[in-house]
Image: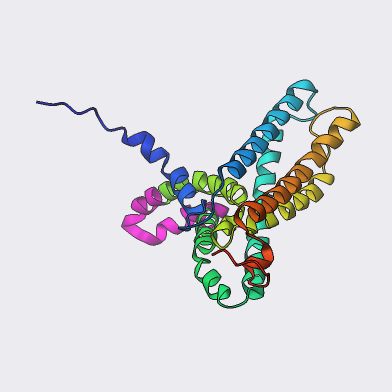
Amino acid sequence: MTQHPPRRTRPAFLMLPFALAARVFRPARPGRLTDGTIEAVQLARTVIGIAATIWMIYAYPMQQSMSAFAKEKLAEVLISTGVLVVAGPLALVLFVAAARAPGRAVYVRRLSGPMAGFAALFASVLILFLLLQNSGGARLAPQFGAFQIVFLLAALAAVLFAVPFGLAAAVLCVHYVFRTGDVHEVLPPLLSPLLVWVMFGFQLTGGSPVVAPPAVQLLFLIGPPVSVSLLSLWELRRLRNKFGVTLLGALHRGRRPAHW
């Protein structure tokens, strides 16, 4: 008799919010252009940025505690997500409106991906707001009478799921630029600089987390938006040279044949 190893259901269950967030927010349109070089450069830029931040923390004295620094970085991610929630749909509406037929109808059909991400993010925030704001879950429980224990258990499960899902959704929403690549490949490199320069404006209002020379502080302040902007320009240039993809072509307003 063959014995099968026990299934590891608990780790799989714990990873479910992250797996679902990755599925919802990662671009998944069939036929979407993918370039390994672009993805590798983006990953390298992220790794370099993380490594530089870690080096800065350990090379210079902190002006705040590590917990305060972590909360600040989390706040930046949430602000970036909020910016994308506003700028993403607006950019998609302008892009679709500017496109000529027959491209406009194609792009409208592709809006389902970003709309699914927006709906999932909104649902997770709404659940947490209703259940946690002013102990909303505890106040709603008595209305279920004998089933209030069942409601409280369901509410607890919803919160435990929504918190990691919402955090993963915020990170992935920023990383994949609101899944706008599902509509067209030129949109993420166009929106990324807007996002980082808006965040640059927010960071100008706060001080540096470390006691460092002015040149170092300026480098870490201006480095992220400049590097992302240069990377976006390079990505647009590579899309044009390797695949013949341009913004005017995507809008069916250029001489080059449009890529679908």
**Furthest-left residue in this view:** 1
**Furthest-right residue in this view:** 214
The image shows residue 59, relative to residue 216, as above or below, that is above
- Percent x, y of residue 111: 53, 66
Image quadrant in which you'd find residue 168: top right
Q: Which residues are magenta?
A: 129-154
- Percent x, y of residue 187: 64, 59
- Residue shown at 63%/59% (left/top)? 245
- Residue shown at 50%/57% (left/top)? 120
| Residue 147 located within the stretch drawn in magenta | yes
Task: Using the image as rendered, state which of residue 78 and residue 27 is in the foreground.
Answer: 27
Whether residue 205 appears in this view of the structure is no
* Quadrant occupied by the C terminus: bottom right
| Residue 66 located within the stretch drawn in magenta | no
Q: Is residue 94 left or right of 183 when viewed as pictured?
A: right
Q: Is residue 7 left or right of 113 when viewed as pictured?
A: left
- Percent x, y of residue 48: 68, 32
The image shows residue 111, relative to residue 54, as above or below, that is below
